Image (spheres, rainbow, N blue to C red):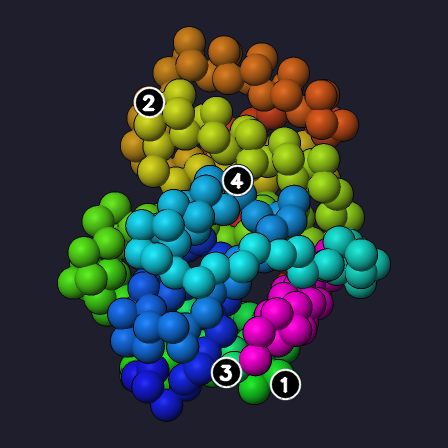
Amino acid sequence: MLRDCAPCVVAVSGGVDSLTLAALAHRTLGHEAYMVHAVSAAVPTAATARVRALAAHEGWQLEVLGAGEFDDPRYLANPADRCYFCKSHLYDALAGARPGQLVSGTNTDDLDDYRPGLDAARERGVRHPFVEAGVSKAGLRAIARALGLGDIADLPAAPCLASRVETGLPIQAPALGFVDAAETLVRDTLGAHTVRCRLRRSGVVIELDPGGLAALDAGHRSALTTALTTLAREHGVRGDVAFAAYARGSAFLRP
Protein backbone atom coordinates (compact mmCIF):
# COMPACT_ATOMS: atom_id res chain seq x y z
CA MET A 1 0.00 0.00 0.00
CA LEU A 2 2.80 2.42 0.83
CA ARG A 3 6.12 1.12 -0.47
CA ASP A 4 5.72 2.76 -3.88
CA CYS A 5 4.99 6.10 -2.16
CA ALA A 6 8.44 6.39 -0.60
CA PRO A 7 9.62 8.86 0.39
CA CYS A 8 6.28 10.18 1.56
CA VAL A 9 4.92 13.20 3.42
CA VAL A 10 1.85 12.33 5.49
CA ALA A 11 -0.77 14.98 6.23
CA VAL A 12 -1.60 14.30 9.90
CA SER A 13 -4.70 16.07 11.21
CA GLY A 14 -4.98 14.23 14.51
CA GLY A 15 -7.99 12.07 13.63
CA VAL A 16 -8.07 8.29 13.39
CA ASP A 17 -7.61 8.25 9.60
CA SER A 18 -4.40 10.25 9.37
CA LEU A 19 -2.92 8.90 12.61
CA THR A 20 -3.41 5.33 11.41
CA LEU A 21 -1.82 6.16 8.06
CA ALA A 22 1.10 7.88 9.79
CA ALA A 23 1.72 4.89 12.06
CA LEU A 24 1.50 2.50 9.13
CA ALA A 25 3.82 4.66 7.02
CA HIS A 26 6.40 4.93 9.78
CA ARG A 27 6.40 1.20 10.48
CA THR A 28 6.57 0.39 6.77
CA LEU A 29 8.96 3.05 5.48
CA GLY A 30 10.89 4.16 8.55
CA HIS A 31 12.91 7.31 7.91
CA GLU A 32 11.31 7.65 4.46
CA ALA A 33 8.02 8.64 6.11
CA TYR A 34 7.75 12.25 7.24
CA MET A 35 4.72 13.56 9.14
CA VAL A 36 3.42 17.12 8.94
CA HIS A 37 0.67 18.57 11.14
CA ALA A 38 -0.83 21.96 10.31
CA VAL A 39 -2.12 24.10 13.17
CA SER A 40 -4.60 26.96 13.08
CA ALA A 41 -7.68 28.15 14.93
CA ALA A 42 -9.64 25.51 13.00
CA VAL A 43 -7.69 22.62 14.53
CA PRO A 44 -8.86 21.35 17.95
CA THR A 45 -6.17 21.69 20.60
CA ALA A 46 -6.77 18.06 21.56
CA ALA A 47 -5.91 16.97 18.01
CA THR A 48 -2.53 18.71 18.11
CA ALA A 49 -1.78 17.24 21.53
CA ARG A 50 -2.71 13.78 20.22
CA VAL A 51 -0.39 14.12 17.23
CA ARG A 52 2.53 15.26 19.36
CA ALA A 53 2.00 12.47 21.89
CA LEU A 54 1.82 9.68 19.32
CA ALA A 55 4.78 11.10 17.38
CA ALA A 56 6.89 11.04 20.54
CA HIS A 57 5.75 7.52 21.42
CA GLU A 58 6.32 6.13 17.92
CA GLY A 59 9.46 8.11 17.11
CA TRP A 60 8.09 9.88 14.05
CA GLN A 61 9.79 12.63 12.13
CA LEU A 62 7.22 15.37 12.72
CA GLU A 63 6.95 18.98 11.64
CA VAL A 64 4.22 21.28 12.93
CA LEU A 65 3.48 24.32 10.79
CA GLY A 66 0.81 26.83 9.83
CA ALA A 67 -0.87 26.35 6.46
CA GLY A 68 -2.01 29.97 6.11
CA GLU A 69 -5.69 29.44 5.30
CA PHE A 70 -6.67 32.28 7.64
CA ASP A 71 -4.86 34.69 5.33
CA ASP A 72 -7.17 33.74 2.46
CA PRO A 73 -10.41 35.80 2.24
CA ARG A 74 -11.97 33.08 0.09
CA TYR A 75 -11.65 30.61 2.97
CA LEU A 76 -12.80 33.14 5.56
CA ALA A 77 -15.98 33.85 3.56
CA ASN A 78 -17.02 30.24 4.28
CA PRO A 79 -18.55 29.33 0.91
CA ALA A 80 -19.86 25.84 0.21
CA ASP A 81 -16.45 24.89 -1.23
CA ARG A 82 -14.47 26.30 1.72
CA CYS A 83 -12.65 22.97 2.08
CA TYR A 84 -11.10 23.43 -1.35
CA PHE A 85 -9.26 26.55 -0.22
CA CYS A 86 -8.27 24.99 3.10
CA LYS A 87 -6.83 21.85 1.51
CA SER A 88 -5.10 23.89 -1.20
CA HIS A 89 -3.19 25.80 1.46
CA LEU A 90 -2.53 22.63 3.44
CA TYR A 91 -1.05 20.63 0.58
CA ASP A 92 0.97 23.58 -0.70
CA ALA A 93 2.45 24.00 2.78
CA LEU A 94 3.23 20.29 3.04
CA ALA A 95 4.86 20.25 -0.37
CA GLY A 96 7.12 23.08 0.74
CA ALA A 97 8.01 21.39 4.01
CA ARG A 98 9.65 18.28 2.65
CA PRO A 99 10.22 16.60 -0.72
CA GLY A 100 8.24 13.42 -1.25
CA GLN A 101 4.89 12.00 -2.27
CA LEU A 102 2.03 13.68 -0.42
CA VAL A 103 -0.40 11.16 1.09
CA SER A 104 -3.65 11.56 3.03
CA GLY A 105 -5.79 9.33 5.23
CA THR A 106 -8.85 9.59 2.98
CA ASN A 107 -10.78 6.30 2.89
CA THR A 108 -13.42 4.90 0.56
CA ASP A 109 -16.32 6.14 2.72
CA ASP A 110 -15.17 9.71 2.09
CA LEU A 111 -15.83 9.32 -1.62
CA ASP A 112 -19.59 9.15 -1.01
CA ASP A 113 -19.77 12.70 0.37
CA TYR A 114 -19.34 16.18 -1.11
CA ARG A 115 -15.62 16.81 -0.54
CA PRO A 116 -14.22 19.76 -2.52
CA GLY A 117 -10.94 19.22 -0.69
CA LEU A 118 -10.44 16.12 -2.82
CA ASP A 119 -10.28 18.38 -5.88
CA ALA A 120 -7.40 20.28 -4.28
CA ALA A 121 -5.69 16.96 -3.57
CA ARG A 122 -6.14 15.73 -7.14
CA GLU A 123 -4.72 18.95 -8.58
CA ARG A 124 -1.58 18.50 -6.45
CA GLY A 125 -1.05 14.80 -7.05
CA VAL A 126 -1.88 13.76 -3.50
CA ARG A 127 -2.34 10.01 -3.12
CA HIS A 128 -4.83 8.28 -0.84
CA PRO A 129 -3.39 4.85 0.06
CA PHE A 130 -6.51 3.67 1.89
CA VAL A 131 -8.67 4.48 -1.14
CA GLU A 132 -6.20 2.76 -3.46
CA ALA A 133 -6.38 -0.36 -1.27
CA GLY A 134 -10.18 -0.22 -0.99
CA VAL A 135 -10.14 0.42 2.76
CA SER A 136 -13.30 1.78 4.37
CA LYS A 137 -13.61 3.60 7.70
CA ALA A 138 -14.39 0.33 9.45
CA GLY A 139 -11.42 -1.34 7.81
CA LEU A 140 -9.21 1.57 8.78
CA ARG A 141 -10.26 1.23 12.41
CA ALA A 142 -9.44 -2.48 12.23
CA ILE A 143 -5.96 -1.60 10.95
CA ALA A 144 -5.52 0.83 13.85
CA ARG A 145 -6.40 -1.93 16.32
CA ALA A 146 -4.02 -4.35 14.60
CA LEU A 147 -1.27 -1.74 14.95
CA GLY A 148 -1.96 -1.52 18.68
CA LEU A 149 -3.09 2.09 18.57
CA GLY A 150 -5.52 1.58 21.44
CA ASP A 151 -8.06 4.35 21.98
CA ILE A 152 -7.16 5.98 18.65
CA ALA A 153 -8.99 3.20 16.82
CA ASP A 154 -12.23 4.26 18.50
CA LEU A 155 -11.88 8.02 18.10
CA PRO A 156 -15.11 9.62 16.90
CA ALA A 157 -15.09 11.53 13.63
CA ALA A 158 -13.45 14.90 14.16
CA PRO A 159 -13.75 17.32 11.23
CA CYS A 160 -12.13 20.73 11.52
CA LEU A 161 -13.75 23.36 13.72
CA ALA A 162 -14.65 25.51 10.72
CA SER A 163 -17.16 22.83 9.74
CA ARG A 164 -19.24 23.88 12.76
CA VAL A 165 -19.96 27.31 11.23
CA GLU A 166 -23.05 27.52 9.04
CA THR A 167 -22.21 28.01 5.38
CA GLY A 168 -21.99 31.70 4.49
CA LEU A 169 -21.20 32.94 7.98
CA PRO A 170 -17.62 34.23 8.13
CA ILE A 171 -14.91 32.10 9.71
CA GLN A 172 -13.41 33.95 12.69
CA ALA A 173 -10.60 32.63 14.86
CA PRO A 174 -12.11 33.74 18.22
CA ALA A 175 -15.40 32.04 17.36
CA LEU A 176 -13.58 28.78 16.62
CA GLY A 177 -11.82 29.13 19.96
CA PHE A 178 -15.26 29.22 21.53
CA VAL A 179 -16.34 26.13 19.59
CA ASP A 180 -13.30 24.19 20.79
CA ALA A 181 -13.76 25.25 24.42
CA ALA A 182 -17.52 24.67 24.33
CA GLU A 183 -17.24 21.15 22.96
CA THR A 184 -14.62 20.26 25.56
CA LEU A 185 -16.80 21.64 28.36
CA VAL A 186 -19.91 19.78 27.22
CA ARG A 187 -18.04 16.53 26.56
CA ASP A 188 -16.41 16.61 29.99
CA THR A 189 -19.68 17.51 31.73
CA LEU A 190 -21.97 14.96 30.09
CA GLY A 191 -19.54 12.24 29.05
CA ALA A 192 -20.90 12.42 25.51
CA HIS A 193 -18.95 10.65 22.77
CA THR A 194 -20.00 13.03 19.98
CA VAL A 195 -20.49 16.76 20.57
CA ARG A 196 -20.83 19.50 17.96
CA CYS A 197 -21.08 23.20 18.75
CA ARG A 198 -22.78 24.68 15.70
CA LEU A 199 -22.69 28.41 15.04
CA ARG A 200 -25.82 29.28 13.10
CA ARG A 201 -27.60 32.43 12.07
CA SER A 202 -30.14 31.52 14.75
CA GLY A 203 -27.50 31.23 17.49
CA VAL A 204 -25.44 28.50 19.15
CA VAL A 205 -26.69 24.92 18.88
CA ILE A 206 -25.04 22.14 20.87
CA GLU A 207 -25.66 18.82 19.13
CA LEU A 208 -25.33 15.65 21.21
CA ASP A 209 -25.31 11.92 20.62
CA PRO A 210 -28.03 9.83 22.35
CA GLY A 211 -25.89 9.31 25.45
CA GLY A 212 -25.28 13.03 25.79
CA LEU A 213 -28.96 13.85 25.36
CA ALA A 214 -29.87 11.27 28.00
CA ALA A 215 -27.41 12.88 30.44
CA LEU A 216 -28.77 16.38 29.76
CA ASP A 217 -31.16 16.67 32.68
CA ALA A 218 -32.65 19.99 33.80
CA GLY A 219 -29.75 20.75 36.12
CA HIS A 220 -27.09 20.12 33.49
CA ARG A 221 -29.06 22.05 30.87
CA SER A 222 -29.31 25.12 33.10
CA ALA A 223 -25.68 25.03 34.23
CA LEU A 224 -24.34 24.45 30.73
CA THR A 225 -26.52 27.16 29.20
CA THR A 226 -25.16 29.68 31.71
CA ALA A 227 -21.55 28.57 31.27
CA LEU A 228 -21.76 28.47 27.48
CA THR A 229 -23.41 31.89 27.29
CA THR A 230 -20.57 33.36 29.35
CA LEU A 231 -17.96 31.54 27.28
CA ALA A 232 -19.56 32.75 24.05
CA ARG A 233 -19.57 36.35 25.24
CA GLU A 234 -15.87 36.09 26.13
CA HIS A 235 -15.13 35.00 22.54
CA GLY A 236 -17.35 37.59 20.87
CA VAL A 237 -20.04 35.07 19.93
CA ARG A 238 -23.65 36.19 20.30
CA GLY A 239 -26.94 34.33 20.27
CA ASP A 240 -29.01 32.05 22.45
CA VAL A 241 -27.78 28.56 23.32
CA ALA A 242 -29.93 25.57 22.34
CA PHE A 243 -29.46 21.79 22.45
CA ALA A 244 -30.37 19.25 19.77
CA ALA A 245 -29.68 15.73 18.54
CA TYR A 246 -26.45 15.30 16.58
CA ALA A 247 -26.90 15.54 12.82
CA ARG A 248 -23.84 14.93 10.66
CA GLY A 249 -22.78 17.96 8.61
CA SER A 250 -25.81 19.99 9.63
CA ALA A 251 -24.00 23.34 9.38
CA PHE A 252 -23.31 22.77 5.69
CA LEU A 253 -25.82 24.38 3.34
CA ARG A 254 -25.63 23.25 -0.26
CA PRO A 255 -25.75 26.06 -2.84
Q: Can residue 136 be seen from the camera position used here?
A: no
Give SS at disc 2.
helix
Q: Is residue 150 visible?
A: yes
Mark 2 or mark 3, which is nearer the start of the sequence?
3
Between the C-alphas of marks 3 and 2, the distance is 46 Å
Q: Is residue 116 above or below residue 202?
A: below
Which percent across, then down, holds residue 190? 36, 24
Q: Of callouts 3 and 1, which one flags the residue occurring earlier in the amino acid sequence?
A: 3
Residue 91 occupies quadrant: bottom right
Which residue bears the numbered disc 1? 123
Crowding around mark 2 (Cα neighbors within 10 Å: few <14, some 14 to 19, many 20+) is some
Identify the mark at residue 101; answer none if there is no mark.
3
Residue at the limit of the structure toward the right, as seen here = 73
Assign a secondary structure to mark 1: helix
Q: Which mark is residue 215?
A: 2
Magenta stretch, main secondary structure, is helix
The correct choice, above or below, for 105 with respect to 68 in the image is below
Quadrant of the rendered image containing residue 58: bottom left
**SS type, badge 4:** helix
> For the magenta stretch, what is the residue range?
78-99
Query: Are dots 1 and 2 in contact, CB under 8 Å?
Result: no
- The residue wearing badge 4 is 45
In the image, taking residue 175 as reference, residue 103 lies left or right, namely: left
Camera-near label (1 vs 2) is: 1
Q: Position of residue 96 (x, y in %)?
A: 65, 73
| Residue type for callout 1 | Glu
